[in-house]
Amino acid sequence: MTDTLKIAPSILSADFSRLGAEVEAIDKAGCDYVHIDVMDGHFVPNLTFGPPIIECIRPCTDKVFDVHLMINPAQPHLESYAKAGADIITVHAEADVHLDRSLQMIRGFGKKAGVSLNPSTPESVIEYVLDKLDLILVMSVNPGFGGQSFIESQLDKIRRIRSMIGDRPIDLEVDGGVNVETIKSVTDAGANVVVAGSAVFKGDDYSATIGALRDAAGA
């Protein structure tokens, strides 16, 4: 899958005091998506961005805004994130009682619909919504904090989901602990979108880091 590899730096690890400039920097450095981790302090133990922040940074780039909603409930807020400038809106299967309805709503707003799975959540929960998905996000850490180590058990889950997807036009994204040491195993397992937060933002040369990730993946 590395021939279609997309790199999605997570701005959770960016310098919040200059967020717009950071978004512009990763754009110029060659990112494919801008990954935006929305946390509510309830579903996960941190607070991050809301629609006003996303709306403010939307003019900073034309790159895809990949918005990952780690919030519960998500449904009442979907329209706000769509209007703020999200291109992909991903909800958590664990936080959404009516997952099918949420995915229909996201597509109804003209956005791509994604679903995310925590490390302990089996892929079977998305079997009956595959026809409404544009993206599946496998969490390879427990959500809520940046800088965690990759959970190796998720590689088997990635392989099984890649098999489930078959020839459907669904992106398979992985988020958590992805760096130059782990990216090859992730893409070999079947992922074609990788989220990298601290791996990108910890250095000064974002272009070199993104290039190193592509090289390590064999892309």
Image (tube, helix red, strand yellow):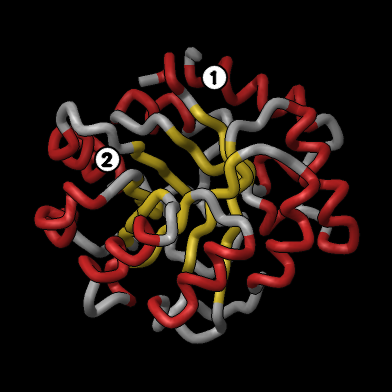
Q: Residue at x 78, y 62 (%)?
A: 56
Q: What element carries label 2?
A: helix
Residue under the point 47% across and 48% down: 175
- Marks 1 and 2, how far apart in space? 18 Å
- The mark found on residue 216 in the picture is 1
- According to the image, label 2 marks what residue? 158
Pick the front one: 104 or 23? 104
Residue at 55% x, 80% y: name it.
40
Q: Which amino acid does label 2 sit on?
A: Ile
The quadrant in which residue 165 appears is top left
Q: In which quarter of the image is the N terminus?
A: top left
Location of residue 90 with respect to 213 vertically, above or below: below
Horizontal side of residue 15 vs 115, given as left or right:
right
Q: Residue 114 location, x and y as percent?
A: 36, 53
Pick out the residue farthest to the bottom. Answer: 42
- Residue 180 position in % (x across, y down): 57, 29
